[in-house]
Image (tube, grey):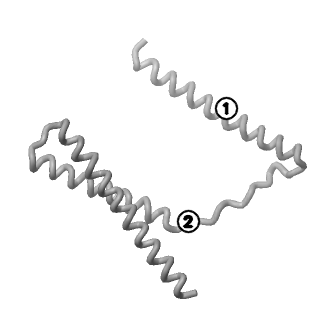
Amino acid sequence: MGPEVIVPVTMFVCTTALVFGLRYMSNKEKMAMIERGLEPSFKPRASAPKPFVSLKFGLLLVGLGLGLLIALFTVRATGLDDDEGVAVYFGCLSICGGLGLILSYVVEKNWLDKQKDLN
């Protein structure tokens, strides 16, 4: 039995267990609500929308893309072998992804400060 058989079987078993587990927990939650005298169709309100999540992930992805590009040019320009190139890729991705998140924080903080000044 090679991996070409084990992987699909494992994925099927895990997916099936996940679906049945979620259904079981949902049913258990509804039964607990009925025992407490609550309406099972009642759902608590969703949390307030977070407008800066898209900005944060967008800037993170831009930072990661720039990190990949910088790492590619660095590895090609210096002629590093695969082992050393991996470290350059990892470092550039981490640094540029972090810079994207910092930029997202700065933009969000400036916007919130402007909103506070208007009120």
* Nearer-the-camera pick, 65 or 11: 65
Q: Secondary structure at mark 1?
A: helix
What's under tag 1, amino acid-wise?
A: Phe
Q: Nearer the viewer, mark 1 or mark 2?
A: 2
Q: Is residue 28 left or right of residue 11?
A: right
Q: Is residue 78 left or right of residue 68?
A: left
* Nearer-the-camera pick, 93 or 69: 93
The relative height of residue 62 versus residue 20 in the rendered view (above or below) is: below
What's under tag 2, amino acid-wise?
A: Lys
Asked where in the image residue 34 lies, by quadrant, the reply is: top right
Residue at horizontal 77%, vertical 42%? Answer: 29
User: Is the residue under label 2 in contact with that under label 1 (CB below 8 Å)?
Assistant: no
* Nearer-the-camera pick, 20 or 89: 89
Residue at horizontal 54%, vertical 82%? Answer: 116
Q: CA distance from mark 1 to mark 2?
A: 31 Å
Res. 50 mark: 2
> Which quadrant would the C terminus be assigned to in this image?
bottom right
**Crowd around label 2: few <14 · some 14–19 · many ≥20 (10 Å):** few
Residue 108: percent from the left, percent from the top?
46, 71
Residue at horizontal 27%, vertical 54%? Answer: 67
> Which quadrant would the N terminus be assigned to in this image?
top left
Residue 10: percent from the left, percent from the top?
51, 23
Q: Secondary structure at mark 2?
A: loop
Residue labelled with disc 1 = 20
Residue 57: percent from the left, percent from the top?
43, 59
Residue 44: percent from the left, percent from the top?
74, 57
Q: How many marks?
A: 2
Sequence order check: which comes first, mark 1 or mark 2? Answer: 1
Q: Is residue 18 left or right of residue 74?
A: right
Asked where in the image residue 28 lies, by quadrant, the reply is: top right
Res. 86 mark: none
The relative height of residue 3 versus residue 31 in the rendered view (above or below) is: above
